[in-house]
Amino acid sequence: MDRGTFIEHEGRPAVRFQRTYAHPVDRLWAAITETEDLAHWFPSKVVLEGRIGGTVAFSHDPNIEDDHGTVLAYDPPRKLAYTWGGDELHFELAPTADGCALTLINVLEARDGAARNAAGWAVCLAELDKHVAGGVAEGPHSDSAEPWQPLYDAYVAAGMPSGAPIPGK
């Protein structure tokens, strides 16, 4: 499983994840845009206004305050990007011979957030993997989710930029 890599995205620090799924692009598009699907894997409740300039409402995350973002790109069912705090999330979907490929790029407000956010997205994407496979996915804050701390420790040990505050610590 791809645990994520540290990259520069348009001159800014970012973490990138790539996954392939044996599902059509439309299934993954629903998973990244529909509130009901997002509830199974995203760290916050998300209500997305599907248009460039639209609002993205984030709520019910136990680690951060409720917030709003702005849709930066909206090209169904291939591309979605929006702001979240000082970060940006970029999702790209591409058909493959067996289904589709998902690329998630989290453009970071600060370089030292890389290991923290990469560990968080690894947990979230493991829940997404379960959800689209038809399994039980109770979300990244659930007891059944992959533990965050060992992932974080592995990213730090591998030299990914770290040092950002850890919510709840």
Image (cartoon, rainbow, N blue to C red):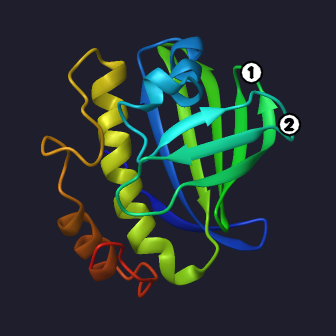
What is the x, y in percent for residue 18? 49, 43
SS state under label 1: loop
Is residue 33 placed above or below 147 in the rendered structure? above
Q: Where on the picture, by quarter, is residue 96?
A: top right
Quarter placement of the C terminus: bottom left
Is residue 9 placed above or below 130 in the rendered structure? below
What is the x, y in percent for residue 46? 54, 37
Question: Is residue 144 toward the left or the right of residue 93 in the image?
Answer: left
Q: CA distance from mark 1 to mark 2?
A: 11 Å
Disc on res. 52: 2
What is the x, y in percent for residue 133? 30, 18
Local crowd size for mark 1, using a 10 Å CA cut-off: few (<14), some (14–19), many (≥20):
some
Say what amino acid the circle numbered 1 marks: Pro
- In the rendered image, the residue lying farthest to the bottom is 163
Question: Is residue 94 toward the left or the right of residue 132 in the image?
Answer: right
Reading the chain from its start, which is encountered first: label 1 or label 2? 2
Q: Residue at x 59, y 22 (%)?
A: 29
Q: Residue at x 41, y 83 (%)?
A: 165
In-front residue for pair 90/19: 90
Q: Residue at x 37, y 49 (%)?
A: 2
- In the rendered image, the residue lying farthest to the right is 53
Quarter placement of the N terminus: top left
SS state under label 2: loop
Say what amino acid the circle numbered 2 marks: Ile
In-front residue for pair 63/130: 63
Residue highlighted by disc 1: 76
* Disc number lying in front (1 or 2): 2
